[in-house]
Amino acid sequence: MAKTHILGYPRIGARRELKRALESYWRGELSSSQLYEVGAAVRRDNWRAQEQAGLEFVTVGDFAWYDQVLNHSLMFGVVPQRFTRGAADTKLDQYFRLARGRAPAGEPVAASAMTKWFDTNYHYLVPEFDATQEFTLDSEWLLAEVAEARAQGFPPKPVLIGPLTYLWLGRSGADRLGLLPRLLPLYRELLQQLAEAGVEWVQIDEPILGLDLEERWRQAFAASYEQLRTDAGPQLLLATYFSPLRENLPLAFSLPVQGVHIDAVRAPGEIDLAVAARSQGQVLSLGVVNGRNVWRTELAGWQQRLEPLERELGDALWLSASCSLLHCPVDLETEADLPAEQRQRLAYSRQKLEELQTLQAALASGQLLPGDGKSESPDTHGDTGVLAELRDSWRPQSYAERAPLQQQRLQLPVLPTTTIGSFPQTGLLRQVRRQFRTGEISEQEYRQHLRAEIAEAVRRQEILGLDVLVHGEAERNDMVEYFGEQLDGFIHTGNGWVQSYGSRCVKPPIIAGDIRRPQPMTVEWSRYAQGLTKKPVKGMLTGPVTILNWSFPREDIPRSASCLQIARALRDEVLDLEAAGIGIIQIDEPALREGVPLRESDHGAYFDWAVGCFRYTCSAVRPETQVHTHMCYSNFNTIMDAIVALDADVITIESARSDLRLLEAFASGDGGYPNEIGPGIYDIHSPNVPERAELVARLRKLVEVIPAKKLWVNPDCGLKTREWAEVGTSLLNMVEAAREVRTALEIVDIA
């Protein structure tokens, strides 16, 4: 009989218990022992859910206080030199210093760099290697979790990030692959420790096998896994996900591993190839339940597809979710207010376990499951009609023609200062929002509160001396969820939380139908804020590609079609903002990069419609209206052509945690960004307040590579998650730093 398992489970808790505990610990309200108790309870609940669903093993090692990649960095002794100074006394606080730059104990320090985990909205902490990197093994936490699961009666299957993927995820001044001979012995030692702990199977994740790898990386797999082979060690399940394996499929199955997992949702056409490639007795694990969406699986179709495979493979066939369920909400049972007709169409992580159990039982009994009539996802993007509508819908004037008209209208100084959009969401504001949703206060009272918050945000910005203001987004719970609530065609949940990074969770809306804008969404608040000041106030919108990529999409039409529907709605909003007198409109696209297919050969089709949809939203504005966009941590070098094609007048990017390394792609010259740019000069994901001298030094470095007339000064990202006390000091230091450098530039010009 086919067996069932999963690659990983959400770690935030069914009601975000871990998030709340972490933030309480960071504020000094919770002791470390109390935090450990919350973590243990989350793990116990996760393992119990897997056991109750009849899974062969429970997955161990997928829990993390902040990030699973950081877990591995500490396990293998990858701690940059700056973290050894003023270190915390405990491993836990040292862990948080690496993650956040600050912990309850230990000196503040620049936090680890952060970027997106493949093509998801999850952020991992980038390992930092150097040429002299020495690895050490400290597996106490993983062995403790194995023992913890065993003590509770759960059979553990530990999960590790494979050695090649771990090195590939990092950054180094030297050759990362050259570090492999130093790292492999520690992986081998770790596997021996797990064998001694009685572990039967270890899942070892190598998702880079779904990428276009350089030949030397491909060649490193065989020798590496040969070195990890031990007669007495645990059996290895090599896990791949997020992408078809293509030319790497024979390689994956040729390795000396006892099983291979493939993502059958992303690559259903590779199932037969995998069956043919597997060695005698080798386990084939198929990810048949979508680990990255919330729609119920069409189990009847999978039953029909898998029955001949089960007859051929027997218990060498394992069924799983396509990837870790980290990317899905936890439990649909927590959605008490969701209408029944919507609930019956959805499956969160807990329900996906039940789907695996149902499918396993149906295959064993031969009793046919009823079909739900849902059509399969399109095999191709089906973009022909979308591209036809987008063609020739660009702004008719070039940036060179628009820029002087915008400067004449806005009258901004050199190195204009601004923020990315959101300001702190205070406890009072969250309370007022809850009271409005529960009916404790009227809509009129709620709007009065929002106006007061906006007026206060404008007042603070004027006192700080910022040049371009924002209204602060007090009315928004989330940059995507808010628009999902304003547009037709979305399902809105109460507890559909997914981890983005650390304790930061987002609640993606669900695209369930055709998308339309019934009425203006942001115009009232932007108009009100602009009426409070003579300085320009940016209108703030989330772009069509980001709304799509940060929502759970439909599976019955191409993603490009949904994106165009969103773009049509936003285009109307842009024109209404312009008509209301808003001279700067920011259309954020932080998720443009993560929607890019992992294979380069698929990039062109994606960018054709993604870039086209962005440009469509602002295609009809006047040339004197300045269009901004914003992008988050990502590998920009590989998509620079697409970013340039967006043709935004100003782009702001997160770059501070990379020590401005990400800026290299945007620097002036051939292939750089030709318009205006605002690299984030301080990290908003850390509570550390930047010193003025530090910001001056960064700005001076920036004006060496970007013309001052094209350079904006801003933080890394929105300030929603920060506190006003730190925000005020940080922005004041930023404004003063910009003035100092601006004055120096003026003196040079005069001379």
Image (cartoon, helix red, strand yellow):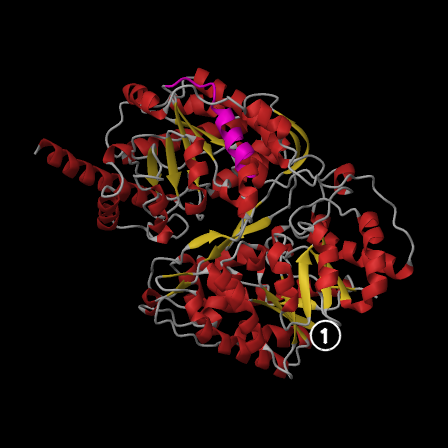
Looking at the figure, which quarter contains the N terminus?
bottom right
Question: Of residues 664 and 35, which is closer to you in this image?
Answer: 664
In this rendering, the answer to whether 287 lies above or below 460 is: below
Magenta highlight on residue 612: yes
Q: Could you say where residue 154 lies in the image, as x and y percent from the top left?
A: 71, 72
**Residue occupying the point 69% across, 53% down:** 349
Relative placement, left or right, of 35 versus 127 is: right
Q: Is residue 480 visible?
A: no
Relative placement, left or right, of 686 versus 427 is: left
Magenta highlight on residue 184: no
**Residue occupying the point 64% across, 56% down:** 323
Residue of label 1: 153
Mark 1 is surrounded, within 10 Å at the Cα level, by few (under 14), some (14 to 19) or many (20 or more) other residues, namely few
> Which of the 4 quarters of the picture holds residue 100?
bottom left
Relative placement, left or right, of 17 versus 641 is: right
**Residue occupying the point 34% across, 38% down:** 678
SS for dot 1: loop
Question: Of residues 749 and 168, which is closer to you in this image?
Answer: 168
Q: Could you say where residue 83 lies in the image, as x and y percent from the top left?
A: 35, 66
Q: Amino acid at mark 1?
A: Gly
Looking at the figure, which quarter contains the C terminus?
top left
In this rendering, the answer to whether 508 lies above or below 403 is: below
Q: Could you say where residue 730 lies in the image, as x and y percent from the top left?
A: 31, 45
Q: Main secondary structure of the magenta part?
A: helix
Q: Could you say where residue 739 lies in the image, as x and y percent from the top left?
A: 21, 37
In this rendering, the answer to whether 631 lies above or below 149 is: above
In this rendering, the answer to whether 445 lies above or below 49 is: above
Residue placed farthest to the left in the image? 751
- The magenta segment: 606-623
Q: Is residue 425 visible?
A: yes
